[in-house]
Image (spheres, rainbow, N blue to C red):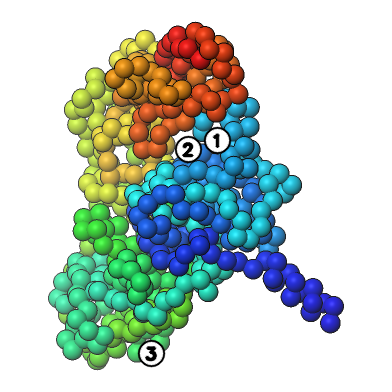
Amino acid sequence: MLNAIAGLLLAIRLAYSSPVDYDIALAGNFGEPRPNHFHCGIDIKTGGVEGKRLLAISDGYVSRVTVGLSGFGNALYITHPDGNTSVYCHLKSFSPSITRLLRRWQYAHESYVADVRLGPLDCPVARGQFIAISGNTGASQAPHLHLELHETQSGHLKDPLDVLGSCINDGQAPMAHAFMAYPVPGKGVFEGGSGKRSYAFTGHKLNRKFRAWGKVGFGIWANDYMEVTYNKYGVRETVLRVDGNEVFRSCVDGIPPTVNRRINYWGDYQHYFRYGTWYLKSFRTPGNTLPFITADGNGGIVDFNEERNYHIEYSLADYFGNTSVYEFVVCGNKEDIQGVKQGKQRETMHGDRLSTYSYPGVYVVIPKGMLDDDITLSPRKMVGNDAFSPLYSFYDRPCPLASWAELGIAVRSNVADTGKLYVKSNDGKYCGGRYRDGWVVANIRELGIAYCLAYDSLAPRIVPFGRNSWVSRQRVRVLVTDGESGLMTFKGFLDGEFVLFERIDKTDIYECKLPETPVRRLGKQRMLTLVAIDKRKNKSVQCLQIEY
């Protein structure tokens, strides 16, 4: 009896509730495919505005507060006693008690960018307690709350609906739009062709019969929906059956963070890059090691080796069990299958082992397991805008890697300071790099774009923001830019004492609210020193006399 009471009390104490004080509508769900990553949480709508009160979803303690890291913007982590950690992202601001802890860390480390780690006694919170204000910071396209749920020890990503499902109403099943046929090169044909091709679902059961021979994989374009909004969501569970036998199943109920980029291998990345829609393959490619996918002994590939009708069925389900079924028939029709031309051996990169490619002035090293399958490079050398190296590309279409490869570009001319050299992509993105024995070596994760060397010896620019003065209503605003390698740090000091400048999100403007700093107002002329350093360690210093 005592054990039952203790269990009941524990369940009550660890109960979860909504992070908002209004009915939840989702803008995105867990596991949606995105370029280079899964959507690892749920997006809760905030009415298209910032400023909504956010609440702790369960008892616990604030274990981490971050500012300006990755794409989360301002983010808050709460560790719960049941082994979960909830993460609240894109926040506008934090509660006063959490803000005080953040400010203490920022001043101790003289840094606006923050990663504050806290213990169980530093900031305990209760379920339903106010913790933050919703916003649009970081890599957010519109105001909303991005909420994640992690296993505290492993970092394994879980579906927040596992604890918040009772807060959401959904009676609408997923919907399939089309399927894609993928004949295995040299081993299969579909509708008389060896290339992939899509076919629309005009209903749940297609009247048209398709024909195939040999080995063919299938993929599906589908979305989930909810009644309260027009948003599209990812499908939690997909099952492919052939003649009633399951050949493939995916159930996106958890995602290890180390496999996030392998969405590019499960999804048809080339099709998405061109058309903006995801076909998720119902077969396992060599690089697709996602643990929530299961397939038969053929990896989900269907072998049409008999002249008869094959009954294909897709079953789609969401978290709440809403299910839809789509069916079509494929007739085995024997026909010749053309072989595959072999690429140049020297330029073949292998997915199952370390591969290297070198050419005068450039090399790339791709570790084992970084490619979905073997590929034949199509390297090109082009004239770049910079005199420091040509542009080098390795593949004629997008080719994302599961993790980092090493790129080296030779330094062909004398430079005053090799530490100012770096690698950039042809779209101007900074890729970093370090000088080593005549080469600049950097890490890259995409083979389908071009790279070259660049040189940055120019310091960042610090200019006033505002027409009349730098100081307005006891606030200092400055515009800090760096058109080369990019800004690394920006700091301010009033009479030698650090004062916090916060970046106004999605701008290059930094603002210091003088009354909120530890520096006392003296009502006299004082020296404000501003220091900006870019990613190649070029430094700019501006000094300003202000009255404060």
Residue type, label 2: Gly
**Toward the viewer: 523 or 207?**
523
Q: At 60% across and 27% down in the image, what residue appears?
A: 107
| Residue 362 placement (x, y as % from top left) | 32, 31
| Residue, far right | 2
Q: Identify the secondary structure beneath mark 1.
A: strand
Q: Which mark is residue 68?
A: 2
Q: Give the residue pinned by disc 3.
A: 244
Seen in the picture, residue 59 relative to 166 is either above or below; the reply is: above
* x, y percent for residue 305: 28, 84
Q: Is residue 264 above or below residue 357?
A: below
- Residue 495 at least partly seen: yes
Is 1 left or right of 128, judged from the image as shown?
A: right
The answer to whether one can see residue 536 in this image is: no
For disc 1, the marked residue is 114
Observer-side mark, 3 or 1, equals 1
